[in-house]
Image (cartoon, grey):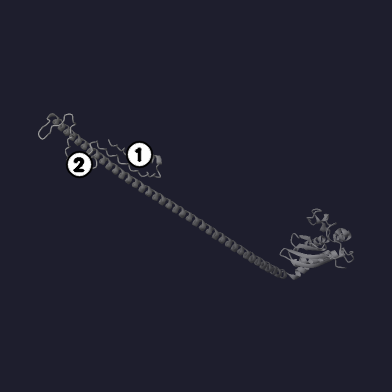
Amino acid sequence: MAQLIDIQRVEVGLENLTARVRLSDDAPLMTSEDLHGTTRVYNLMPHIIEHACLGDAGKTFKAAMGNTELAHLLEHVTVELLAQTNLAGDVTSGRTYPIDGDERLYDVQISCADDVLTAGALSSACWIMGWAFSGGGDPAPDVEAIVRGLCGLVDSLGDEPGKRYEHEVEGRVAAEVEDERRRLLAEREAEIASAREVAYAAAERAARERAAAHAAERAARVAAEEERRQEADRRAAARLEAERVLAQREEELRRLEAERQRLEAERLEAERLLAEVYAAAECDEGRTTDGMAATDVAPGAAGASAEDPHQAPRAQEDEPIPDFLVDATAGTVDPESPSEPELPADPAPQAEPDAYAAPWEDVSSTDDRRHDDMPPTQGVR
């Protein structure tokens, strides 16, 4: 009998056994391609149709058995053998996966309570499938004998191989878990280190930005304070300059007022002296008139010669002016001139300096105040 199904590899896990199987080139891919072979399997294991099957055809394998993959039928034959041994646990399950790239290649996964039992059941199922789809010659497989053989194989091995294998698997799994834990821990530490570096860089950048902002704020504050100080200095300088100009102006006003008072005093003194001169002149004129009248009344008096009454009388010489009057009227009255002496002209008013216009005053108000401060100058009478 040609080999219908080839088991290429077997992987045993803690709960499942996974076998990579390949159908021979002359084997049918679907049970519908050889319903006689499918019927032979059913005749050997009639309870196979009662298996729960979560395919699209129905809830049990009965609905799918006539048109399903041969590898799927292999899965249910293996599960039926394990179920009949009563050594595989209460529930035995399996799944079948096609492999991409090869339509004759499948992975058959069987729940595994005992790897030796599961591997023996899978091997026996492959032999039954080969017999059924190769014509079904005699002798036919004895399912009960196969089940007894599987149970005897497990009993002969005892618990030691299973425990040893379990320990080996647990050791491998623990090593893999430890390696994975270390790998994840290293990755996590690397992530933490990277995050820490990023956080440090962000904190340093934020610190630099805060320092720059504080420096800029401090520079702006210093500049503002310097500007305020300079403005205060400028205002103080302007105030001092205004005070100096105001003091200078007041000093000039006082000087002008003193000069005006001096000129006024000189004018009054000149008027007084001129009045005295007028008074003295009037006295002299009165005496001269009296003398001339006496001469007319007593002609030919002692020391006087007779004159022609029709001849104009000779003017009498004036008496000399006293020295105190000459000194008082020096440069003012000419004794030789009988005319009235000229009054001294008013002194020319001195030009006043331009009034300083303070920053807080208007020019018009300054001019008005300058004219208001100056008393009116009295003219010479």
Nearer the viewer's eye, disc 1 or disc 2?
2
Is 259 positioned to the left or the right of 4 in the image?
Answer: left
Q: Quadrant of residue 118?
A: bottom right
Element assignment for label 1: helix
Is 225 positioned to the left or the right of 6 in the image?
Answer: left
In the depicted view, which residue is nearer to us: 168 or 347? 347
Q: In the rendering, at what x and y percent does residue 90 appear?
A: 74, 60
Quadrant of the frame with the N terminus = bottom right
Q: Quadrant of residue 79?
A: bottom right
Going by the numbered disc 1, the residue's amino acid type is: His
Relative to 259, say whether 129 is above or below: below
Q: Which residue is mark 2?
A: 326
Is 123 positioned to the left or the right of 193 in the image?
Answer: right
In the depicted view, which residue is nearer to us: 234 or 86? 234
Q: Mark 1 touching mark 2, by CB under 8 A?
A: no
Residue 151 visible within the image? no
Q: In the rendering, at what x and y percent does residue 74 appear?
A: 81, 62
Residue 364 visible within the image? yes
Q: Residue at x 80, y 65 (%)?
A: 21
Q: Residue at x 30, y 45 (%)?
A: 255
Q: Which residue is mark 1?
A: 371
> Mark 1 vs mark 2: which is more N-terminal?
2
Q: In the rendering, at what x and y percent does residue 154 appear?
A: 76, 68
Element assignment for label 2: helix
